[in-house]
Amino acid sequence: MSTIVERFKKIKSKIVSLNVNKPVNIIAVSKTFSIDYIQPLIDYGHLHFGENKVQEAISKWSIIKKNNQNLKIHMIGKLQRNKVKDAVQLFDYIHSLDNQKLADALAKQQSNFNKNLNYFIQVNIGNEIQKSGIPVNELDEFYNYCVNELNLKVLGLMIIPPIEGKVDGYFKSLSDLNKSLGLENISMGMSADYVEAIKYGSTFVRVGSSIFGSRS
C-alpha cells in the first residue's frame, strides 16, 4: 500500500477515535501535486480533493472527473471573479465565498450551467488586513443575501485562523457563529490543527502535508 494511503488511513483512524457525532469529511489538499502522485488515494476510493488554483485544477481533474463522477473537487483558495465561469464548471464545493460581487458572479454562472454548488462563507475571524473573508459584523447580512436573494446553497462557514496564538478561541467563535445561523457544517482545521477543529464541530477538514508530504 502506498505511503499516502497509509497516512490517510492513520488520519481517518484518529478522527474516528474522537467519537464525534457528525461525519467528518477529509479534503485531501492536492494542490501542486500531480495526478500520478495522487492516484493511489483515488484508487483507494477517497473522493474529496482540494485545490487552490482554478487553472491547475482544470488541467489535473477535468478528464479524470468525467470518468469518476463521484469525485468531489473543492476550491479552497481565493477565487477571482474572472475565473468563476471555469470554476463553476469543475468544482463541487467553494470554500472561499467572501464578497457580494463574487456571490453575484457565482449565482449567474450556476444558472448558465444549470449547476448547484455547495458553498462555505469565508469569515475573517481575526480581522486580519491581509486575509480575505467577511467581517464578523457583516456576516448576517451577507449570509441572508446569498441564501435569500441568490439562492446559493450555503452549507456553513470557513476560516483560516491567524498563525499567532492558540486556534481554540477562533474555532469556538466560528462554531458559535455557525450555530447562530442555524448551519450544521463547518470548514476549518488543517494538518496542524484538524483534531482541535473537529472538537469544535468542524465537518470538513483540509489536510494536505499530513497526507501528501511537504511541497517542494
Image: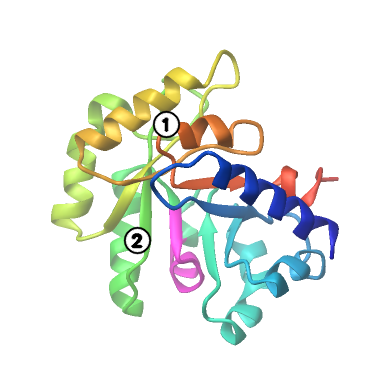
Q: Quadrant of the N terminus?
A: bottom right
Instruction: Give the residue at the far bottom of this rendering.
Output: 67
Give yes or no for residue 124 being in the magenta stretch: no
Magenta span: predominant SS is helix
Along the line of sight, the residue nearer the viewer: 31 or 20: 20
Question: Residue at the location (57% across, 34% down)?
Answer: 195
Magenta range: 84-94
Kind of residue sitting beneath label 1: Tyr
Kindly state the secondary structure of the residue where label 2 is placed.
helix
Mark 2 — residue? 106
Residue 137 seen in the figure: yes
Report the side of 142 relative to 53 (left or right).
left
Residue 99: x %, y % from top left: 34, 43
Question: Residue at the location (66% across, 32% down)?
Answer: 192
Q: Quadrant of residue 150?
A: bottom left
121 vs 131: above or below: below
Along the line of sight, the residue nearer the viewer: 63 or 203: 203
Instruction: Give the residue at the far top of this rendering.
Output: 165
Give yes or no for residue 92 being in the magenta stretch: yes
Question: Residue at the location (49% across, 66% down)?
Answer: 91
Q: How many marks?
A: 2
Mark 1 — residue? 200
Say few, some or many: other residues with alpha carbon within 10 Å of mark 1 (under 14 / 14 to 19 / 20 or more).
Answer: many
Q: Quadrant of residue 98?
A: top left
199 vs 19: above or below: above
